[in-house]
Image (cartoon, coloured by chain):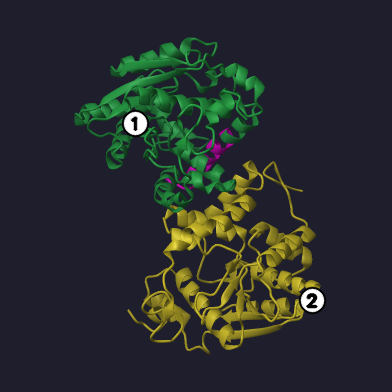
Chain colours: A yellow, B green
Amino acid sequence: MVRQRGKVVEAMKPETYLSRVSKTISKFKLVEEGDVIFVALSGGGDSASALFTLKSFVDQKDVDCELKGFHIDLGFPSGKTLDVVKGQTDLVGVELVTVSTKELGVSFPDVVKKTSRPVCSVCGVLKRYVMNKIPREMGANKIATGHHMDDFLVFFFKNVISQNFFWISKFKPKLESSHPKMLCRIRPLFFVGGKETRDFCESMGIPFVERESCPHTSLDCYTDLNRAKWYETLYQIEKKHKNFRCQMARSIVKMNKFFAVEASRVVECPLCGEPTNQETCSFCRLFKGVK
Amino acid sequence: MVRQRGKVVEAMKPETYLSRVSKTISKFKLVEEGDVIFVALSGGGDSASALFTLKSFVDQKDVDCELKGFHIDLGFPSGKTLDVVKGQTDLVGVELVTVSTKELGVSFPDVVKKTSRPVCSVCGVLKRYVMNKIPREMGANKIATGHHMDDFLVFFFKNVISQNFFWISKFKPKLESSHPKMLCRIRPLFFVGGKETRDFCESMGIPFVERESCPHTSLDCYTDLNRAKWYETLYQIEKKHKNFRCQMARSIVKMNKFFAVEASRVVECPLCGEPTNQETCSFCRLFKGVK
């Protein structure tokens, strides 16, 4: 039990955490025989925990599949991240694949300077593009990310408020491929939150870097400040309504089918051939300067 | 401006309140030429404000329609409520129709003793039944209630958590009739909250009784305690996220169409002839002892 501002908040035991994630992997068939799964590792604790729990599941159930760590080097000044990611894959004994944006001929800082889009949004476009293209070209059929329950709840609130209901249809532990070139996306941490994940990493001795290692963002940024406030709000609600986050996450999984009706057609970008639901993909529009 | 626990919470001016409710009435066509609208008055401030704002709209726009107050006397010991309701209708100069459960041959206390259902649920069944049947028989085509923004947000959270998504499809300012015997339900206070409504009543000198005048409920009741906690939570969120309640209410109106797909067929109850989506209506099952 951990006391926070006079209130008692239940801390989750590592075995409970592991068991809850295993149930998610099993129930939603996140891991299947013959899979080649790349786990996107940012250096942070969330993705490290996704790798750790997936590897633990595969070993325990003896599933015949391949797991690899995948890191995108965004060329940030601090060189520490790559070492930490190496430590994360070494800990569980899986291969690490790294790709640097320089190798891809992309200059992240240049694009950030030129565009009016927030830096987090540019980074998101780049990472989603690379995370789908490179693993697929290397034989993967699935990409795993460290998005957890709190992330999806914050996305949910923000999307409900801005009336972007279609996005809610994507909030589930397994997002099937909607195009031959689109990898299936899996989120083993869908039913555990940020606090539990951090505690788990600390209990298991999983190395991770703090989110603040990104030199582009800080809490001075409005987008980040607003997001941080939403994470706080979730825990505030949970203090009053026990199990709120987990109940909401379960509801969102049941609810997302209602919003899937607006799904748009996925086609290949005429410039790069990668899947997109727009005329030209976001990556080409941003990084190749196409308007 | 009102200071609450060191935070500044905007108080809504009566003219802003009235203007927002008028916009709701106008935009969602809550009042139309030729309407006969009964306004369900409990004695509380919410329904009194619904009557006051509707009357103000009708007078200002000179709409050719009929407005009446409608009160169900549940036979509670305190005789004060009827006087207050009379004061509410006198204030705006409309006729008051009252019906007592005794006249209807229904003994509320007896049923509460016999059933295992929570008292609020029994009361809800009774009121919804009477509120639809009697006004319709007296020529009404619409029934107005004092449900406000906070009520719908609390319903929303509770229904999302319990995965009763179908009910969300009913959360809108105007619920059209789904059966010839079912009145159209209108909620003029959909975009104003409980706090604003209370302030408005006080500013305008509208008389009302406290909710606690119901002798059956108190905060010792789990259902009530849980509901009260949700109302507090809404204001807590709003302190961090300005305009949260109003944004959510707007989103819910846009969102409800997604959940309408599960709509069930409305038929006539074989015992009383009133509309129901079950084999025998809830009223007959409870008050006529049909299992």
Q: Nearer the viewer, residue A148 or B177?
A: B177
Residue B96 inside the magenta-drawn segment: no
Specify whether A136 is left or right of A93. left
Residue B240 inside the magenta-drawn segment: yes
Highlighted range, magenta:
B228-244
| Residue assigned mark 2 | A62
Q: Secondary structure at mark 2?
A: loop
Near mark 2 (Cα within 10 A), the count class, few <14, some 14-19 or many ≥20, is few
Dots 2 and 1 on the same chain: no
Residue B62 rendering spot, x and y as whole percentages: 19, 29
Give me the residue at 41% from left, 76% from top: A282
Write down the quadrant of residue A58 in the picture. bottom right
Give me the residue at 40% from left, 47% from top: B253
The three-letter code of the residue at mark 1 reads Lys
Chief secondary structure of the magenta portion: helix
> What is the number of the mark on residue B142?
1
The three-letter code of the residue at mark 2 reads Asp
Position of B232 relative to A259 (above/below): above
- Distance in Å between CA atoms under marks 2 and 1: 64 Å
Residue A17 rendering spot, x and y as whole percentages: 74, 60
Mark 2 or 1: in front is 1
Specify whether A102 is left or right of A115. right
Position of A154 relative to B177 (above/below): below
User: Which of the image's four quarters has the N terminus of chain B?
Assistant: top left
> What is the number of the mark on residue B33?
none
Q: Nearer the viewer, residue A48 or B248?
A: B248
- The chain carrying label 1 is B
